[in-house]
Image (cartoon, grey):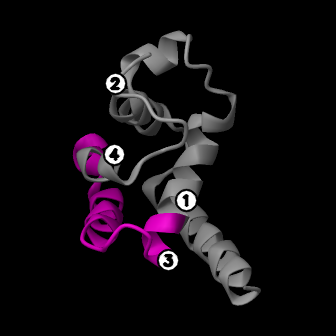
């Protein structure tokens, strides 16, 4: 229905988030966006954003979906109450979860 919306947070939406917060966040986005899609870090970042943006409850007929994934993620990250350091820690925890899951395969 909306060409800029996907079912879950897409890799292409990582780099546009770079300027939404401070230095710690910018460094994290740079680290992740410079890696190939499907890499452990990109999977972890996407999972973290899926949780932050509540992608699992995004309805394709909703206002959020009409904004598109990049705009939704920008709004979510800019409004997030956690500090950049806490977001970095959330990413590290999510990366640990991804590693555990991948090691079970």
Where residue 13 is drawn, which disc sits there?
4
Say whether disc 4 or disc 3 marks the residue closer to the N-terminus.
4
Verify whether residue 25 appears in magenta. yes
Query: Viewer-nearest of labels 1 and 2?
Result: 2
Query: Viewer-nearest of labels 4 and 2?
Result: 2
Verify whether residue 46 appears in magenta. no
Q: Secondary structure at mark 2?
A: loop
Dot 1 corresponds to which residue? 86
Say whether disc 4 or disc 2 marks the residue closer to the N-terminus.
2
Tags 4 and 1 touching, CB below 8 Å: no
Q: Is residue 88 visible?
A: no
**Few, some or many C-alpha atoms within 10 Å of disc 1 (few <14, some 14-19, many ≥20)?**
few
Q: CA distance from mark 4 to mark 1?
A: 21 Å
Q: Position of residue 70 (x, y in %)?
A: 34, 35
Q: CA distance from mark 1 to mark 3?
A: 20 Å
Q: Please report the bounds of the magenta region as a residue range.
A: 17-43
Q: Secondary structure at mark 4?
A: helix
**Few, some or many C-alpha atoms within 10 Å of disc 4 (few <14, some 14-19, many ≥20)?**
some
Q: Residue at x 42, y 14 (%)?
A: 66
Dot 2 corresponds to which residue? 3
Q: Is residue 85 visible?
A: yes
Q: Quadrant of the N terminus?
A: top left
Q: Secondary structure at mark 1?
A: helix
Q: Residue at x 48, y 61 (%)?
A: 45
Foreground pick, 99 / 26: 99
Say whether disc 1 or disc 3 marks the residue closer to the N-terminus.
3
């Amino acid at each position: 229905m909306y060409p800029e919306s996907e079912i879950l947070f897409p890799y292409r939406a990582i780099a546009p988030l770079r300027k939404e917060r401070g230095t710690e966040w910018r460094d994290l986005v740079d680290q992740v966006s410079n890696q190939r899609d499907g890499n452990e870090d990109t999977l972890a970042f996407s999972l973290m954003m899926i949780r932050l943006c509540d992608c699992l409850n995004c309805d394709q007929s909703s206002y959020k979906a009409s904004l598109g994934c990049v705009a939704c993620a920008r709004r979510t990250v800019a409004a997030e109450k956690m500090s950049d350091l806490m977001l970095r820690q959330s990413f590290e925890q999510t990366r640990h979860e991804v590693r555990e899951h991948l090691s079970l395969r």
